[in-house]
Amino acid sequence: MPFSDSRGNRVVFVCHCLLNANAKVDGLARYAACHAPVMQALAESGCGVVQLPCPEFLHMGPKRWWQSKGQYDTPAYRRHCAGLAETVVDQAVMYASAGVEIAGLLGVEGSPCCGVRQIYDHPEWGGRPCDPDVATAKRGGRGIWIDELLACFERRGCAAPALYGAGNEAEETAMPEALSAFLGCNE
């Protein structure tokens, strides 16, 4: 018979930089430590938090330049993300086998890697970073990391968690509507 305690038996997978701004590309952090509205909402949701690895940080370190999805979209970077995805899916499988609900995955809208419905990309971006016209670079689509995570869930025959996008690369301090939707569907 299992022991009884106060755990909520629900977790949400959260993209790394929402919990640790120090992993972000220099010049893009809009908060000092963690995304406070996200943290507050997660605490109120009753979900445990699983911090996803940051494939950009692990691949190129803290002093990297920002890149577009097109620049990240290489076979080597996809292999890197696919390898990291295996460990994430391992955790999801272990939680599910213990009766813990995977309430969702919280990405970062606009990110070329962690966007769930929106990315920034432009065919002219390349080489040394410049100030892009963000309005012309906004695209629908998923980031490389999210693509590889979903592909790994599918390869392993596991149901992928629901995806939610927090903020975006340009306005991360706003409370995202998607997070409200996340809380609404899990009340």
Image (cartoon, rainbow, N blue to C red):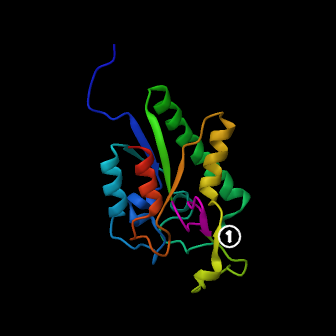
Label tally: 1
| Most foreground residue, 93 or 58 | 93
* Lateral position of residue 109 relative to residue 51, left or right: right
Q: Is residue 34 visible?
A: no
Task: Quadrant for the N terminus, please.
Answer: top left
Asked where in the image residue 161 lies, by quadrant, the reply is: top right
Amino acid type indicated by mark 1: Gln
- The residue located at (59%, 41%) in the rendering is 160
- The residue located at (55%, 57%) in the rendering is 55
Q: Position of residue 118 (x, y in %)?
A: 60, 66
- Kindly identify which residue carries mark 1: 71
| Most foreground residue, 54 or 154 | 154
| Most foreground residue, 135 or 128 | 135
Instruction: Report the magenta residues as a range.
Output: 108-119
| Category of crowding for the residue at label 1, using alpha-carbon neighbours closer than 10 angstroms: few (below 14), some (14–19), many (at least 20) | some
- The residue located at (65%, 81%) in the rendering is 136
Specify the principal SS of the magenta part. Answer: loop
Give the vertical position of 139 relative to 18 (above or below): below
Does the magenta portion include 67? Answer: no
Q: Position of residue 92 (x, y in %)?
A: 51, 37
Does the magenta portion include 116? Answer: yes
Q: Position of residue 63 (x, y in %)?
A: 49, 72
